Structure formats: C-alpha cells, structure tokens
Image (cartoon, rainbow, N blue to C red):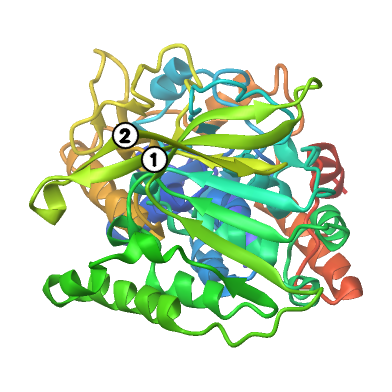
Amino acid sequence: MTFKLLKRAFNSSSYRSGPQVCIVGAGPAGFYAAMHLTKKLKSVNIDILEKLPVPFGLIRYGVAPDHPEVKNVINQFTKVAQQPNVNFYGNITLGKDVHLHQLRQHYDAVLLSYGAEEDKTLGIENEDATNVIAARRFVGWYNGLPSDKDLKVHFVHVMLTYLAEQQLFLVKEMLPLDVARILLMPIDELKKTDITEHALCALSESKLKEVYLVGRRGPLQVAFTIKELREQLKLKNCRTIWNDKDFIDVDKIVPDLPRPRKRLTELMLKSVNENQALTDDDQTKYFKPVFFRSPNKFLVDNNNHLTGIELTCTKLVGDKLEEQRCVPTGEKDIINCNLAFRSIGYKSVQADKDLILKHGVVENNKGIVEDSAGLGKLYVAGWLGTGPVGVILHTMGNAFQVAKVMLENLSSTDNFNKGGFTEIKKIITENNSNVIDWGGWEKIDKFEKDQGKIKGKPREKVCSVEKMIELAKK
C-alpha cells in the first residue's frame, strides 16, 4: 500500500478509534511532542496545524544559514509527519480560521506550541527611528519568513551597531553573534548557504565596515557559546577589536570558573592578548564587542534617521560573581552609527481570544493549562509555555515532558469519540479553501531545492505565501 493510500485508510473513521490530539504549531516543540506521543501510544491520532503553508518553524526560519547541521533535525520531523497516524495541515490560523474552543470541543487533547513571534522593545527615546530594527525581523528577512521579506534594511552607511541585552542571550540560533556573523561573513561563503536571494543581493552591495556588539554586563556574563565565538573569531577578512579595560582582573577569576565558562573566558582573553596579526586593507571589516553599556536613547537627524546611540555606562556590584547586579554609573558614551538591531527578548502573541497570556507566556503547571469543564484537555509546550529561553535541545526536553503528562492523562480513559479534523475541516473550509497538507509541502520543498540547484545552493526558499499555495495546489 502506498504512503498516500495508507494515510487515507488510516484516516477513515474505522481506523480513528484512538485519542484525537491537535498540535497547534509545526515548530520544534510541536514535532518533538508528536514524536514522543506516537512512540509511546500507537493508537493516538495527531493533527498538526500550522499558520504558514510550510512546517518546521524556528528550524526553517530561525537557524543561521551557515549552520545546516542544526537543520538536520528536519529529517526526524519528516519521519514523524509521514507516519499514517500523523497529519500536517498548513495555512491555518488559530483565532481566525478556527478558534480554540472549537479545537477543544473536537479533540481529546490540544497542545499549543506556536512559539514567541513578537519582539520586546527597549522603550527608549527615538526607538521608532529609521534603521532601528528588531533582530528577530532581520533573521526572518535573511531566512525567508514571508512576514519579513519586505523589511527595509539600509546598508549604504559605513558604521553599524548591534544592540543587545546580554542576560537575554539565551536563544542559541537567534543570538546576536549569529546576526553579527552573517553581517560580516564574506559573500562568497554566504552564496553556498540557503540564505534568501534578496538578502544576499543586499549584503553584497553593503558598505558595512564595523559591527559593535553592545552588552549591559561584562565578559564573564556573556551567554554565547565557545563554538559561536570561535566561528566569529575565524571569519575571513574580519578583525575583532576588544576593549582592554573590559578585561581588567578577569584573568584572576578564571581559575575559579565552571569549566564551560572558563573555556569561553580563556578564549576571549587569548583573543584580547593576541597582536591581531591580520593585515588591514580595504576589504577588512571589524567586530567590536563593547561591554558595560546600556542604551539610553537613539540619536537621530531632522528626518528621524539614526545617527548614533547614547549609552549609559554600567558596573557590576556585589561580592559573589553569580549574585552581582548591574547598575548605572551616571557616565555616558556615544557610538556613531547608521543602523541598529535590538535583541532583548521575545514574547508570544495572543492567537485566540480565549487564551490568557501573562508576561508573554501561557501560565501552566508542567504543561497543563487550567481546564474548563466539558472541553478537551489543554496543554502548552515550547516558548509559549516557558518563555523564549534555551537552545533547541531545551525545547526538546520540555516537549517530551509535556507529552509525557499528556500520555498519562490520555491513558486514564478509553472513551474516545471526538471527531478530530473531520469536524474541524468543516469549520475551516467555510472561509479557507487553501489548507495545505504534507503532500502540498513536498511540492514546495521540491521546487525550492530545484531552484537552489540552479543557484548552487541547498535551496532557494519561497518567500510568498501566495506562491507557496500555488505550488502546493498544482
């Protein structure tokens, strides 16, 4: 029996006698949860609903183009989606095409895992200036996220700064260091990745020379990994310039640091102490980490174009390293620049009116959201429930934990009579006739890979939802 026939047979009413589970969000959290559920409960039927016509969420749109090895997890997710008791349905928006109470009515369990797609703001003067951009949107721009494909990024100026709060450097594949690396990487190397063509063209015409990485605390508090720093330090035609004052007495503390922090700090100190033998020429770019600075206000001209940033100098107070607080000193500093990216964290959006968020997350107890009588159990996993913290491995652990709780609850009953997607489809198709299944995604996937071959790349992503739908419906 072919894959499609097997799917069709399994989805018939005679086969769908087990629990009906709906997962909203086809990113890492959703797929990892589905992986665990199907492994432990053979009778489960899972429908994965996704707002975009394509799956994989942050893996597709958040991972840096030059980190293809991180995207290999897509192979695992594909095997999950191809199981006969798992269905992917794209181009479905929660709160618009279908509502939460409807999903809960027709499924035995609903897992929300649609992530955190809204960036936090600094809340300082002139933050609305031209060329002050959320790093999240810049990442989406060069990775082909449809909502960010038309982002206006002006690279015509020489100076650039990258602004970030270090204590929030927790998202491995959307770290400020990732963005800095993409900005400074030679175009010939970027051409070999799946970076979007529009981003590649813009970066190739850029006159960018300097990238400042500004952090509120010191080198002992950075949260990028040693691997990421090594990648940055090894960039061709790029020279790293540290501020020696930021590292005063740091070498005395190194012996007492935990091993990962010790190795990272030693690498920074080694870089600081080297003579930077690279010979400067017209092709040389500069990466300049600046510590102990906090943004105070953006400086603009009469046309509201960014001209610089006023920073407040900071210092750490407290005897124990892990308990030190960062406080302003009252001194000010200015960096002249024409482009700034802010990266101070992300928050989830209220996708449905019945969903209650507090501080950007859905409150939960081990993944369980407070239930209402008569409706299916509601769960949350990934950033929607934890906040935007941790690497993909952290998301996997959280998703497995929540899936385990779901299994315990589903195993406590054998009375399953929910209609699942058979009923939900009736609701969705009233206003949306363009639901994209896994077969539709495979057509998009093939087209992207074929276009990539023409350009010598792994793939050339389709950045238009309309084009995705057209390809999927062929």
Residue 36 in view (yes/no): no
* Residue position marked by numbered label 2 in the rendering: 328
For label 2, the crowd category at 10 Å Cα-Cα, with few meaning under 14, some 14 to 19 and many 20 or more, is some
For label 1, the crowd category at 10 Å Cα-Cα, with few meaning under 14, some 14 to 19 and many 20 or more, is many
Q: Residue furthest right?
A: 454
Q: Quadrant of residue 418?
A: top left
Q: CA distance from mark 1 to mark 2?
A: 6 Å
Q: Give the residue at x 67% y 59%.
A: 210
Residue 464 is situated, as x and y percent measured from the top left of the image, at 81, 42
Residue 470 in view (yes/no): yes
Query: Residue 221 versus residue 430: which sits nearer the camera?
Result: 221
Is mark 1 in CB contact (under 8 Å) with mark 2? yes
Q: Give the residue at x 44% y 58%.
A: 172
Q: Quadrant of residue 71?
A: bottom right
Q: Quadrant of residue 239?
A: bottom right
Query: Residue 441 versus residue 241: which sits nearer the camera?
Result: 241
Residue 97 is situated, as x and y percent measured from the top left of the image, at 63, 21
Amino acid type shown at disc 2: Pro
Amino acid type shown at disc 1: Cys
Element type at marker 1?
A: strand
* Residue position marked by numbered label 1 in the rendering: 313
Residue 107 is situated, as x and y percent measured from the top left of the image, at 40, 29
Residue 187 is situated, as x and y percent measured from the top left of the image, at 79, 71
Q: Is residue 399 left or right of residue 446?
A: left
**281 is higher (above) or lower (below) than 243:** below
